[in-house]
């Protein structure tokens, strides 16, 4: 029997450095209203959806760094988004930069939340795989996430929301099989994942021409191998002179892409996800209990004595 969850990938085009939170929230609400016209249950927004992608700049002033972060959620700027979600009866997923005080110590995380149809936060995730560097490099563009964010301290939790088992990943997390498998082992049925993926930074570990391919490959492989749906959502386009890929997509447990944005601007794509497709794969080819054999995998390092490459 089918069990449907109608989702929207709400892609954002560029956000200017001087664009206010209020202006961005207005864009998010416009996208949410468009999704509401499609009868959507949940809207998925990108990573760091409230501001420009500030980790491209080396900022030294602590107050200026803090100005890119949210101390509480919701707050004055984002409350209208929560109110509108409640009014429309739509849930959402939102990425933002979070300041968290724990035992009197300030922490900065790259965070995402799930908000239910009543406007309540019912799930949180803090990005684990923080890419880039701490220091400015001699190359065309910078990606300084390591300077601004600590590694997330929540693992990869799953939450029961919208009558589904929902998980979250943030951008670089999608490239790592562990991300998907840890949620897969918890029975995840749909993964929400926002991203800011630049091209032209001069990275040696990726080829710009392959960046869109690797984006799609990561989602398709993660979904198929863990029998889950995913909603991948970009902040796209030329932002402050730096190009970021779009390609926001909804991917089925079969690994098939069922919807994809075709612009690099604000855009909504929708799919009515049949969650029973996830159960079909979990019952059969990816029935972990029946077929997965972790006790026989061994550790390659133990068998060969080889050290992994540095880096
Ligand atoms: N925001 C990101 O995590 N971006 C990385 C880039 C820097 C490789 C990504 O994996 O898309």
Image: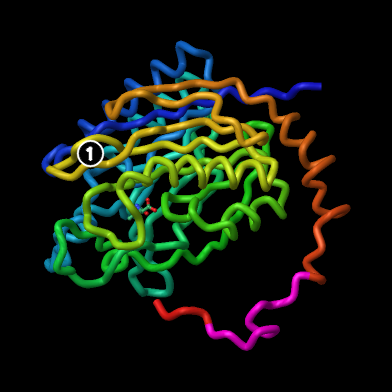
**Residue visible at 40% across and 35% down?**
45
Image coordinates for residue 219, horizontal then vertical, percent: 53, 42
Above or below residue 289? Residue 254 is: above
User: Residue at 33% of width from left, 70% of height from top?
Assistant: 106
Q: Residues within 10 Å of mark 1 (few under 14, many from 20)?
A: some
Q: Is residue 306 magenta?
A: yes
Dot 1: what SS?
helix
Q: How many marks?
A: 1
Quarter holding residue 107: bottom left
Q: Is residue 257 left or right of residue 27?
A: right
Which residue position is annotated with label 1?
A: 21
Q: Quadrant of residue 237?
A: top left
Depth check: give the residue in front, 255 or 62.
255
Does 31 sit left or right of 4 as displayed?
left
Q: Residue at x 47, y 31 (%)?
A: 249
Look at the image and name its color scheme: rainbow
With 207 as the anchor, is 121 left or right in this view? right
Q: Position of residue 262 (x, y in %)?
A: 36, 23
Q: Is residue 4 above or below residue 145?
A: above
Closest to the observer, 124 or 48 = 48
Give x and y (percent) for residue 182: 64, 58
For this orientation, the residue located farthest to the bottom is: 305
Measuring from the top left, give residue 109's x and y in whole percent. 38, 60
Q: The magenta stretch spans which residues?
A: 297-307
The residue positioned 28% from the left and 68% from the top of the image is: 133
């Amino acid at each position: 029997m089918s069990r449907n969850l109608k989702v929207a990938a709400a892609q954002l085009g560029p956000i200017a450095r001087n664009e206010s939170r209020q202006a961005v929230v207005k864009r998010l609400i416009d996208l949410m209203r468009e999704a509401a016209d499609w009868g959507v249950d949940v809207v998925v927004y990108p990573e760091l959806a409230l501001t420009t992608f500030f980790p491209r700049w080396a900022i030294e002033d602590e107050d200026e760094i803090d100005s890119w972060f949210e101390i509480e959620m919701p707050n004055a700027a984002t409350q209208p988004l929560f109110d509108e979600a409640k009014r429309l009866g739509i849930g959402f997923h939102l990425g933002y930069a979070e300041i968290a005080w724990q035992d009197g110590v300030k922490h900065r995380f790259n965070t995402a939340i799930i908000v239910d149809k009543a406007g309540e936060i019912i799930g949180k995730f803090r990005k684990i795989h923080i890419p880039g560097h701490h220091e400015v490099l001699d190359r065309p563009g910078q990606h300084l996430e390591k300077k601004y964010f600590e590694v997330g301290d929540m693992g990869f939790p799953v939450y029961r929301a919208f009558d589904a088992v929902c998980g979250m990943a943030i951008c670089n997390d999608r490239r790592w099989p562990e991300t998907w498998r840890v949620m897969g082992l918890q029975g995840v049925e749909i993964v929400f994942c926002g991203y800011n993926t630049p091209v032209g930074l001069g990275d040696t570990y990726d080829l710009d021409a392959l960046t869109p391919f690797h984006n799609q490959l990561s989602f398709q492989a993660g979904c198929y191998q863990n029998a889950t749906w995913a909603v991948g959502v970009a902040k796209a386009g030329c932002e402050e002179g730096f190009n970021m890929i779009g390609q926001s997509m909804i991917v089925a447990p079969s690994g098939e892409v069922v919807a994809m944005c075709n612009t690099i601007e604000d855009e909504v794509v929708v799919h009515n996800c049949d969650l029973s497709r996830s159960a079909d794969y979990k019952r059969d080819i990816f029935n972990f209990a029946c077929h997965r054999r972790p006790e026989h995998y061994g550790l390659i390092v133990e068998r060969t004595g080889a050290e992994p490459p540095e880096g």
